[in-house]
Image (spheres, rainbow, N blue to C red):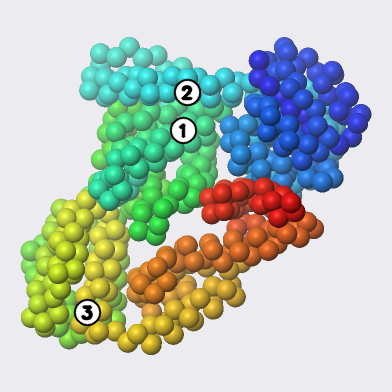
Amino acid sequence: MYKLLIVEDEAIFRTVLPSIIDWNSLGFEIAGVCENGYKALEFLDKTEVDAILTDIRMPVLNGLELAMEVKSRYPRTKVTLFSAFNEFDYARKGLECGIYGYILKSDGEDEIVTHFAKLRDVLDKENQIRIDSEDFWRQRESFFKNMIESPASMSVHFDHKEYPLALIRMDEYKHMAYCSGAHRVRSIHEFIRVYLYEQLEIPNKGMVISLNDMFILLGTVSEHSFVQTVTEFYGNLKEELGMFKKNEEECLDISCVIGSTSANVQELCNSFMSLKESFLNSPYTGNRLITYRELDPNGKRILTFAEEEKLMKEIMQLVNGKAHAQLIEYLEALKNEWIASKLTDLDRISGFAVKLVLAIFNALGEMGKKSDVFLERTNYLMKEISYCDTLGMIFKKLEAFTMEAFELINEENTMKNRRIVDEALAYIKKNYAEQISLEELARYVNVHPVHLSRLFSKDLGNTFKYILTEARMEEAKRLLKDINYKVYEISTLVGYEKPRYFSELFRNVTGLTPLEYREQYKG
């Protein structure tokens, strides 16, 4: 039996709801009944439940704030809002707060029964994957590998007429493993795997197979519905991964390719091999979703030796001429040109980048600007580039390296840099509630984003993301001391569109959920 907590401020519903539904036949038992959100949180401190049915409009702590707090403290617990009002804004805000579902009180008993029957199935599936996790995934991986290797020998019955297919892959899998370690990669991989399972398999829209560094999504719905579903949760997954980033250097970009439908095992294998091949396009298509109709296997080109020599000569002229601004513009234009022309020979691109790094290092030596620290940085970067999987990451590393090189060449003006940092901090303080990016801030203070990022790190010892988050969290703390503000209202006021994201971030920063912080301040 799954445990259910009912939270309702109206006495009649607290009396009727536990008895009017045959909860045991649905697989639930009533663990408790509370009159408001705070009473519910006190109950949850002592008793673990699987699901909560809560009214929205309640005194002290309403249902939306309760949902946010539950999602943060007890992420596995499913919250269903139960309202007398058919209000779209409440339902939308509820989804942003992390609710499982929404039921109108006017819908009657049948709707409640249907909702919780589906919820029981969801909990059953989640328990299945939790209990038998690694074996569960290994069996699927083994089956799929065997099917790909010898499709003719596999006896697989297709229940549906056609199966749509998609692949998702972390763009910088190798780079993350090199820079952050295998444990970090494994934790991100497991998070993506479970997220995809919850979004595709639990709602009975398909199945997920984890295969090395990629995820195979096999749909059991129409192609149109599958594309809609994958497109939606791909965008949401990118946002979720944003919460996992340790710093601005860590790349958690993911790519997704959606293929055609398959009517038999051979077609499915062919579709998979075609999509897998398409990931060779990732040097220029990274961090985006594309369909098989957009793939052009004949449109790719390679980097020639003659082109390499010409580019190297032009870049080194800018280095020797100490024209850093022009060099950054040149590299940006070159990156965009290579992406547009679908340059996919990553080995050649990496080789070119390494030769360029070495050439710049030698040029600094001729200028008498070498240092042991810069030598160590150069050696590390040349190795790091070999682990990059996309053009974007390679050029990001090149831009950062040239920034360091020109700091040595120009022996930067400390006062000027301090002014830039002060202007940037003032802008953040004034605009923290807006969707500020590093690029936007860099344009405001008229420097390159990489340069601004390095100034933050050098002068303040922190990243742009940390500084912006700190400004937002300080304002959130101030607003939490005013009980007239709801937590989800504070989320918007400090620049976070999704209350659940704000709540998780606040907890990561302070060690407390927003409500726990408010309670501690009151105490």
Left or right, residue 164 beside residue 517 = left
Dot 1 crowding, Cα within 10 Å, few <14, some 14–19, many 20+: some
Amino acid beneath label 3: Leu
Q: Nearer the viewer, residue 167 or 442?
A: 442
Disc 1 or 2, which lies upstream in sequence?
2
Does the rendering let one see residue 162?
no
What residue sits right under mark 2 in the picture?
A: 129
Dot 3 crowding, Cα within 10 Å, few <14, some 14–19, many 20+: some
Disc 3 or 1, which lies upstream in sequence?
1
Q: Which mark is residue 454?
A: none
Secondary structure at numbered mark 3: helix
What residue sits right under mark 1 in the picture?
A: 194
What residue sits right under mark 3 in the picture?
A: 408
- Residue 448 image offset from top left, x and y in percent: 36, 76
Instruction: Give the spatial CA distance, label 1 vs label 2.
Output: 9 Å
Q: Quadrant of residue 275?
A: top left
Instruction: Give the spatial CA distance, label 2 vs label 3.
Output: 54 Å
Residue in the picture at 25% in, 73% down:
404
Left or right, residue 240 beside residue 71 = left
Left or right, residue 34 beside residue 50 = right
- Residue 307 image offset from top left, x and y in percent: 12, 68
Disc 2 or 3, which lies upstream in sequence?
2
Q: Quadrant of residue 328?
A: bottom left
Residue in the picture at 25% in, 40% down:
277
Secondary structure at numbered mark 1: helix
Q: Nearer the viewer, mark 2 or mark 3?
A: 3
Q: Nearer the viewer, residue 457 or 449?
A: 457
Q: Nearer the viewer, residue 437 or 478?
A: 478
Residue in the picture at 66% in, 43% down:
69
Amino acid beneath label 2: Ile
Contact? badges 1 and 2 (CB < 8 Å) = yes
